[in-house]
Image: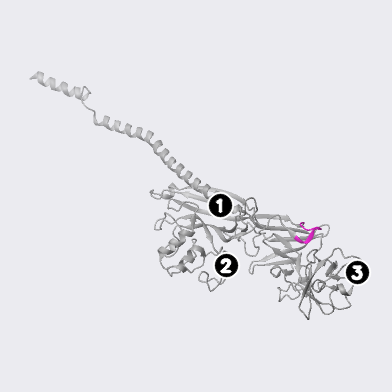
Amino acid sequence: MEMTRNNKAGLVRRSLHGGGGGFTLIEILVTIGLIILLLMLVGYPILAGLAFMEKGIARADALSAARLAMDAMTRELAEAMYVFDPPVDGRFIAFLAPVSPPQGAAPIEPQAAGVRYWAALRDPALAYWPFYSYAPGAPGKPINPYYLARTEIPDPGERRELTDPWNDSGEALTRATFWYSNGHEYPLGETPPVTWPTAQPGYPWLEAVTLYASQAERERWYVERAVGLTPDNVDYDVPTASFSPEPITNEALVPWTTAFPRDYSRYRARYPLWVNFAQWHPPDGAFATMGQISVYSGSPRILAYQTAVEASTGDVWVEDAVGTRLYNTAAYPARDVTDDGQAEFAFGLDYDRGEVRFDFPAIPDTGNPTQDYDTITATASASSYDLPTVTALPAGPPDNRQVVPGSVTVWTEDPDTGSVTYYSQVAPVPADRTTIGSTRFGVDGLQIVFDSDLLDRPGDGETIRVRYRYRNNPEEQLVVATYATKAIINISLTVSKRDIAARTPQASRQDATLVAKVKLKNVPR
């Protein structure tokens, strides 16, 4: 009996001291903790690596999509022949691509259809009630991201007037650039409390609304015309697509040198396609001095005239050095020569060619600007005649009035038969005016001169028509301009890729931003 008790005690002691039994609870808990710690040490980097790999893949996808879109835009935009004025926020760019010329020839004609690059909503109908906003992945909002679209616009220069259902803002806008951003909305008849950031262009969405009653037909029309340059699915987004003209500051313009001698009636900038000063003033102040044309004269150079943009009306005024308004450039090329303040000095702006124009056509009646010629009645005793419009200008001093060389066209009309005879110009005018010749003329100062022989000049009572350009500015002036040119377009494009199925989609978002400067090669001057 004693032995049995001792044996049992030994067994108990061996169990307590690990003599062949299982693990204790403490040992098990410690082992589990060590295993968890080991898994954490090994697994966390693996999980983090997987997350980084997913983000890297998303960023690579976003970057690839951005590069493909940017390459497509820059190639086509570089060939453009004309660019419409962009909106001040740069949300789109619209232009005319050239008709493909024969091999080896330069483009000479733009296509009839326009092209617009813009950020399009995947579902434009969701821009309206009850959503109003763009917030892909946000709580309570539909997944409705942007994608970069290319749209061809038939008749891009067509004007949309007040009576058109596209536009109730009381303003006529071109089809290529009209963007719907006021309080009226389609198609549900509700008025948003605020202007929404997802306002849609007139073409193609609002045109689809006017053409079709069915939402499915509207969406089909929209998708066919808003062709994606970036992926059109919920994983991608284009939060930024911006297009802006290149600012040029304080450039000294040069007289037009194609003609010889130099034509001081036209001062040309390095780049054409100026943005209209009166209509394009971004709110960020980056172009605060855009549209400033300064004219200096004398030696040393002293400011004589400059432009001033009136924001309330959009007028660009020519002012003297002390700010007195002399001439509204919107009146170019017609000006009232009876008004000394306007007639003494004025110039116009040719935005497309990038020129400051000091030359004016002979428009004797500003109420009829289509009549751009002087009318003179010939007499039997006269062989030379003053040109009425230019001689009506104030003579100075100094007297800078001049007919622009090479701009004169002369023809006569017989009052009885109505027959028309065109005259050719001789230059210079010969001292002996008997050698000018029949049906020929010369220009001497502000006069038109014919042969002194009665048989070689317009007959008594014939009507002489003279079309010409004249200027009233000095040759020794300096013209300096600050402008923005659409001949160089700056593009900024951001493409995002995210996992919409993730618990926090925004956390998986990866952005790729590209910028480019595109110089147009085929802009005619």
Q: Which residues are magenta?
A: 257-266
Q: Secondary structure at mark 1?
A: helix
Three-letter code for the amino acid on which mark 2 is drawn: Glu
- Whether the magenta-drawn stretch holds residue 262 is answered as yes
Rendered location of residue 52, percent (x, y): 44, 40
Tell me the residue that label 3 is attached to.
434
State whether residue 270 is above or below residue 464.
above
Q: Earlier in the sequence, mark 1 or mark 2?
A: 1
Question: Total number of numbered labels?
Answer: 3
Dot 2 alpha-carbon crowd within 10 angstroms: few under 14, some 14 to 19, many 20 or more:
few
Cα distance between the residues tagged 3 and 1:
64 Å
Q: Quadrant of residue 221?
A: bottom left
Can residue 192 be seen in this snapshot?
no
* Colour option used: one colour
Cα distance between the residues tagged 1 and 2:
24 Å
The circle drawn on residue 430 is none
Query: Which residue shows up at 13% across the image and 20% down it?
Result: 7
Q: Earlier in the sequence, mark 3 or mark 2?
A: 2
Rendered location of residue 180, percent (x, y): 52, 65
Can residue 218 be seen in this snapshot?
yes
Tell me the residue that label 1 is attached to.
73
Tell me the residue that label 2 is attached to.
158
- Whether the magenta-drawn stretch holds residue 421 is answered as no
Q: Secondary structure at mark 3?
A: helix
State whether residue 431 is above or below residue 69.
below
Tell whether 475 sits left or right of 22: right
Asked if marks 3 and 1 touch (Cβ < 8 Å), the reply is no
Three-letter code for the amino acid on which mark 1 is drawn: Met
Query: Which residue shows up at 54% across the image and 63% down it?
Result: 154
Cα distance between the residues tagged 3 and 2:
55 Å
Identify the residue at the far top of this view.
3
Q: Quadrant of residue 392?
A: bottom right
